[in-house]
Image (cartoon, grey):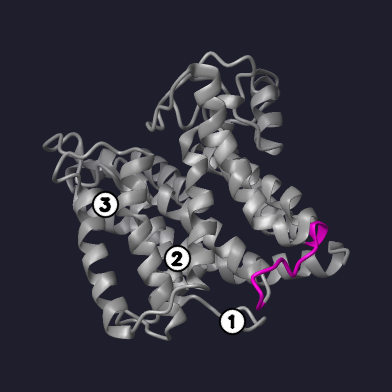
Amino acid sequence: MSAEVKRLDNIQVLRAIAALMVCAFHLQYLFMESDGVKPFPNGEMGVQVFFIISGLIMYHTTRNEQGLPRKSPWLFAQNRIIRIVPLYLLVSFIYVADDISWQYLNENFYRIVKTVFFLPQMTDTLGPKYGYPLIDVGWTLNYEMFFYFIFFLSLFFGRLAYRLLISTIVVFGALIPLVLTGGFDPAYTTFHDYPISFLNLFCNPMVLLFASGVVLGMLMGRVEWGKPLLICGFVVSTFFFIIHVTGILGIQVNIFTDLLFIFPWIFFAAMCDKAGVFVFQQRRLTSIGDASYSLYLWHPVVFAYLRLFAERLSIPYMDFPWLSFLFGMIAALIMAHLSFVQFESRITPWLKSKWLVK
């Protein structure tokens, strides 16, 4: 592989699909009064797709042609902070803007502090969230920042960086639970009486998804398969991914089943990228992937304000669930595009030019 970072268009489309899955999952309430059936019961599984892809992208964008780190730890940390934090905090405070008052700030002081510093709230024993930051989807950013922190520390060890990264995540995600509880529970919903409550999030098996993404990136540099085999593999893995997401077979969602059904889908998409094969008909779908971070953050805000707007105007949006669903998705996509164009493509680079210390 060349030192130049090659764009992974198939992976970008998978990011778009993951973001749209989460959006659809959060609009399911529209259908609960009509027939009580959830049309997207496992849409939240888009988070697992994001986590595996995150591990892959971090490996892909930081290694050189020899598979060794080419970025300094400090440059990596600055890039991640500027890329993630400003937009996240902006959206978080806009999300709660209607409620902000001195009383709200006083009652939610620790919640705000934990949100700003990406610490788990621990107001709930149900994993993998363990309580919500200011904006609901922010719980996933706690996992992301934990992963980035381990990645940052690993980069100090040069050629051992990625192996050390994987080993450290396995220690947190599997070994510590095994030692402290006497067993390993693959479910994400577990809660343990750890000496430090934060360990519930840091040691949740969900963190292993990041390590699997790094492993996937390492495999890309070592595996050479023909295009027909890769396309066939992608088609088959897509079929099994759909089975897993729709829950047709009633298979339990945990770290083992996610790695069994999601990992191959992402692997074959990435390998097709390596082989120069774009497996989707429309390259425009990559633009949704480019804006997937904005879509992921902004969609709860868009949905909340649309619902508030409809209720204040007495619009019977619950009587037309599919129409309301379509309108909500389109509105979220428009907002994501605007955020990507105006903030991610302009303000983020500007912040990097002003604050980035190389």
Camera sees residue 18: yes
Image point (40%, 27%), residue name: 185
State the separation of the CA atoms marked 3 and 2. 15 Å
Secondary structure state at the residue bearing disc 3: helix
Of the image marks 3 and 1, the number of the one nearer the N terminus: 1
Question: Relative to the observer, which residue lies in front, 142 or 336?
Answer: 142
Residue 118 locus on image (x, y percent):
66, 37
Magenta residues: mostly which secondary structure?
loop
Image point (68%, 59%), residue name: 83
Label 2 is placed on what type of residue?
Ile
Image point (64%, 18%), residue name: 196
Left or right? Give the position of 250 relative to 271.
left
Badge number at residue 324: 3
Whether pointer 3 and pointer 2 mark residues with C-beta atoms closer than 8 Å, the reply is no
Q: Read off the magenta span.
A: 65-75
Of the image marks 2 and 1, the number of the one nearer the N terminus: 1
Image point (62%, 78%), residue name: 5
Observer-side mark, 2 or 1, equals 1
Q: Residue furthest right?
A: 357
The residue beneath circle 2 is 334
The residue beneath circle 1 is 1
Location of the C terminus (image quadrant): bottom right
Label 1 is placed on what type of residue?
Met
Q: Is residue 66 magenta?
A: yes
Whether pointer 2 and pointer 1 mark residues with C-beta atoms closer than 8 Å, the reply is no
Secondary structure state at the residue bearing disc 2: helix
Residue 341 locus on image (x, y percent):
58, 71
Whether pointer 3 and pointer 1 mark residues with C-beta atoms closer than 8 Å, the reply is no
